[in-house]
Amino acid sequence: MLVIKEFVKKILAVVFSGMTMAEIFDLFLPTRQSAFVQRRRALLILSRVRLVAATFAVLTPLWIPVDLIIFETSLAMYLAALRVLACIAFAVLALSFRGSDSVAVARWGMIWLLVIPTVFFLISHPLLGQFAINDPAQQVIAAGYAFLPFVMVAGLSVFPITALEGALLGLPLVLAYLLTGLLGYQLLPFASHLGAQWLLLLLASVSTLAGMSQLHFMSQLVDQSSHDGLTRAYNRRVGEEMLVQQFVTAARSQTPLALAFVDLDNFKSINDKYGHEEGDNALRAASTSLRKVLRRGDILIRWGGEEFLAVMPNTDPAGASIAVQRMRQAGLGIRPDGKPLTASIGVAERLADGIETWTDLVEKADQRMYFAKQNGKDRAIGCGETPIVAETASA
């Protein structure tokens, strides 16, 4: 098993050259991305769903005159009615899902975008099969209906999706095409239909890879624009957006949300005595130490020059105290003079402090941080103005 695992890793490293294994796995499963990337991805997917749906809503009925000219009237009218219904469905979809940044909603948007043409394909194929199509012009137009799944599968490439999402979204179209062949409704000879089936699978694979490439590129751009270049913590602009989202979620579900406001002690003296390069090194060390202590679902924000805000969802005052104890025990790095780098920390929690807005939550944690700084620095004040005692790196 270990040999197989290593072999798979080597293959992935060759195919996805220049990417870490963590980045590669992020492209296979939809739950691997951060919440911020997920929201940005959802907004992009929904905007493209609406754009594609609007385009199809306009183009779908434009083919009705062609059907009326090429096919006999009864068949053309059936197809026209089908096209009108599809047009209405696409129009409704183009006007839906506005203002949402939910990944679940985005997936439903893609599903409905593919359901409409799949149903159209499954109805139009048997319908065309009931009529004698012998004229070359009719055969050309009918063949166009046969390639509708190819168009939709190719359309997956415009969405930033994972491998699993690509497989699940493309599978119904592949099965629908296979079903028409097995039931004898194919508009192409069966041998050609099987060859086209293989081509459809290849196209679905290539489209999924293109979607994965889009997802990786988007994740890299979001990561670069959302993180502070020096400390790799989230910058304040993005951090505020994430904090608002976490506060709204906590308020809606009535769950705790804790903040730890971390202000490095005597940081100005580092810049004054040793220069800004040493100050940057101290900031990097502090950020690295804090990120190692925080959980995967926690958020570290560089709030100001030497200020950090640790957002801890689903964390009550006791849990926040434990997290702060770990921060102080792990230490924040070493100053240029060899002494430990310390911080004053203030903790606030939404429910315990009766906070109504996210700004008040930050203000409460900020006040407690100042209280800790005014009372000797290198200490932490928790909810209820209670000191959080721990063996620090300077002890």
Image (tube, rainbow, N blue to C red):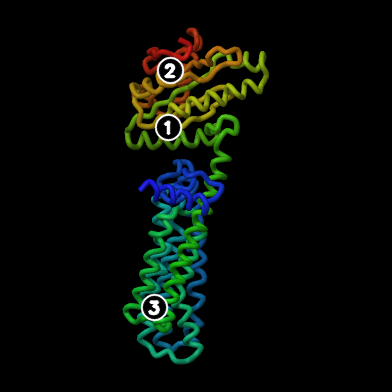
For residue 83, what is the image quadrant?
Answer: bottom left
Q: Could you give the CA–CA distance between mark 3 and mark 2, rounded to whole angstroms?
A: 69 Å
Q: Which image quarter holds the C terminus?
A: top left
Q: Percent position (x, y) of residue 7?
A: 44, 51
Side of 317 where 372 appears, left or right: right
Q: Percent position (x, y) of residue 209?
A: 49, 58
How many other residues sit within 10 Å of disc 3, few (<14), some (14-19) or many (≥20)? many
Amino acid carrying label 2: it is Gln
State the residue position of label 3.
124
State the residue position of label 1.
298
**Image position of 324 with respect to 113: above or below:** above
For label 3, the SS is helix
Find residue 94 and name its label: none
Q: How many marks?
A: 3
- For discs 3 and 2, the disc positioned in front in the rendered view: 2
- For discs 1 and 3, the disc positioned in front in the rendered view: 1
- For discs 1 and 2, the disc positioned in front in the rendered view: 2
State the residue position of label 2.
329
Amino acid carrying label 1: it is Asp
Q: Nearer the viewer, residue 374 or 393?
A: 393
Q: Could you give the CA–CA distance between mark 1 and mark 2, rounded to whole angstroms?
A: 18 Å
